[in-house]
């Protein structure tokens, strides 16, 4: 594929203030891609040729999820990102990586909170109400979800706040579909807690990916770069070589995106996911799209693969998309015992991918194609899809 990444570097005023959001911003995009390619060739080149990384034509404003942390400013509050390595909030008005509708939504949240005189949470003293807000935008639907994180269950004035927020969003042309309160009493770096209360709307937005509709709630895992996600999934499905006859396992399936996108070209799909909320979302997404040949269950991928292998289950294709820690030797051994013709490994950490590809090789699975996709321009992160054949 012909690629042209002559995108000029942009500057951002937040960088001088030690925003850690885009560590590669000062490098031209083509140079970032070349550096990622070189790093991958070094790490993965011994397994197969590394295809040229697929970059973005417009590598800006790709993030569909924004986290903004509240802090006191004058008599009111502001919000933004922590300065690198600190808990000092840098107010953010706009960001080169964030979806512009999400930026507008954060400004609406701030305006509404200030109009209602809601106090920001102060970490040191443990006082105040608003900790963070999380905004998610459906790239194709334009729908917006706002989650307000509070330290406790109390949210005095929440009804007034929601009315004010809806008005502020309307002013800015933001299609606010739902507002939730997320309760996070813990003093950790995790933004969201486990308890949630819907303040307005259905509690989730929908977005379209590869022609299918997905429901996205505040806590569900959903890739943050929707443009590149379609390229990633299409590559993974192409590597699987599906023709409608194969039985497929989608391990570490999240809300079922890869498995559901593959289902039209498969005989059946079984998705395995550890997070119960994500597994439920996956089943609901199958119903929503009337995909009748996909099932999802909540289990540890390794334990379940070991069990399926012992039962003599023989899938034709296994997709695996584990978190950064990668898969496990037991998972890979169980997969080899099931002897699918193909495995397609989607990885967000090339170091653990290299470790796992060596384990696959020892079990008779050879990498045939390695395709990097730049899901996170201006950051060090790299996503890779690898086709493995028995
Ligand atoms: N394939 C999905 C999700 C990938 S993220 C997508 O593209 O959107 C990795 C997923 O693995 C997360 O949803 C996480 O909850 C899940 N996960 C983490 N550890 C797991 C385990 N031991 N067993 C099964 N799933 C696990």
Image (spheres, helix red, strand yellow):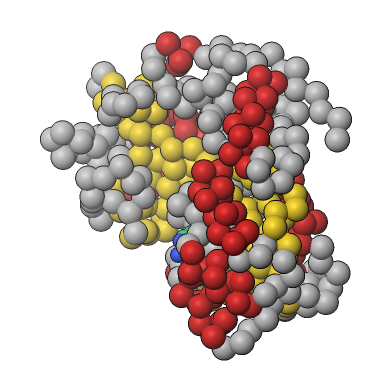
* Residue at figure coordinates x 54%, y 29% from the top left: 379
* Residue at figure coordinates x 83%, y 77% from the top left: 245
Rendered position, 338 above or below 96: below
**Image coords of residue 215 (percent x, y):** 59, 59
**Image coords of residue 323 (percent x, y):** 49, 53
Seen as rendered, the residue at the extreme left is 125
The foreground one among 350 and 59 is 350
- 113 left or right, relative to 348: left
* Residue at figure coordinates x 70%, y 58% from the top left: 366
Rendered position, 226 above or below 295: above
Rendered position, 310 above or below 92: below
Asked whether the viewer can see residue 5, the reply is yes
The foreground one among 285 and 335 is 335
Query: Which quadrant of the structure image shows residue 88?
Result: top left
**Image coords of residue 216 (percent x, y):** 56, 56
Quarter placement of the C terminus: bottom right
Asked whether the viewer can see residue 137, the reply is no
* Residue at figure coordinates x 80%, y 56% from the top left: 238
**Number of on-image labels:** 0
The foreground one among 333 and 127 is 333
């Amino acid at each position: 594929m012909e690629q042209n990444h002559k995108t000029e570097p942009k500057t951002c005023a937040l960088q001088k203030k030690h925003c850690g959001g885009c560590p590669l911003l000062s490098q031209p995009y083509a140079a970032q891609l070349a550096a990622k390619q070189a790093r991958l060739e070094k790490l993965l080149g011994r397994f197969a040729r590394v295809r040229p990384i697929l970059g973005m034509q417009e590598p800006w404003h790709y993030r569909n999820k924004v986290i903004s942390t509240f802090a006191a400013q004058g008599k009111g509050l502001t919000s933004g990102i922590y300065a690198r390595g600190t808990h000092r909030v840098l107010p953010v008005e706009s960001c080169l990586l964030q979806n512009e509708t999400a930026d507008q939504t954060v400004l609406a949240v701030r305006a509404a909170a200030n109009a209602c005189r809601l106090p920001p949470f102060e970490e040191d003293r443990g006082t105040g109400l608003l900790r963070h807000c999380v905004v998610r935008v459906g790239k194709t639907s334009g729908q917006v979800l706002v989650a307000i994180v509070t330290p406790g269950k109390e949210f005095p004035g929440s009804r007034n706040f929601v009315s004010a927020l809806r008005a502020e969003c309307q002013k800015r042309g933001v299609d606010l579909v739902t507002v939730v309160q997320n309760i996070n009493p813990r003093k950790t770096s995790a933004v969201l807690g486990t308890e949630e209360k819907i303040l307005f709307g259905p509690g989730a937005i929908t977005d379209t990916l590869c022609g299918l509709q997905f429901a996205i709630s505040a806590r569900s895992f959903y890739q943050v770069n929707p443009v590149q996600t379609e390229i990633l999934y299409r590559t993974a499905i192409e590597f699987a070589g599906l023709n409608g006859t194969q039985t497929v396992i989608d391990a570490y399936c999240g809300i079922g995106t890869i498995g559901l996108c593959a289902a039209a070209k498969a005989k059946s799909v079984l998705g395995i996911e550890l997070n119960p909320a994500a597994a439920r979302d996956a089943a609901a997404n199958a119903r929503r799209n009337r995909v009748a040949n996909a099932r999802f269950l909540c289990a540890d991928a390794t334990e379940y693969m070991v069990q399926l292998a012992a039962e003599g289950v023989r899938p034709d294709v296994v997709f695996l998309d584990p978190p950064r820690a990668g898969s496990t030797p037991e998972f890979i051994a169980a997969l080899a015992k099931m002897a699918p013709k193909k495995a397609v490994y989607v990885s967000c950490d090339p170091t653990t991918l290299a470790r796992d590809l060596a384990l696959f090789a020892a079990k008779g699975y050879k990498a045939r194609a390695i395709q990097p996709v730049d899901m996170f321009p201006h950051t060090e992160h790299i996503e890779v899809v690898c086709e493995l054949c028995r």
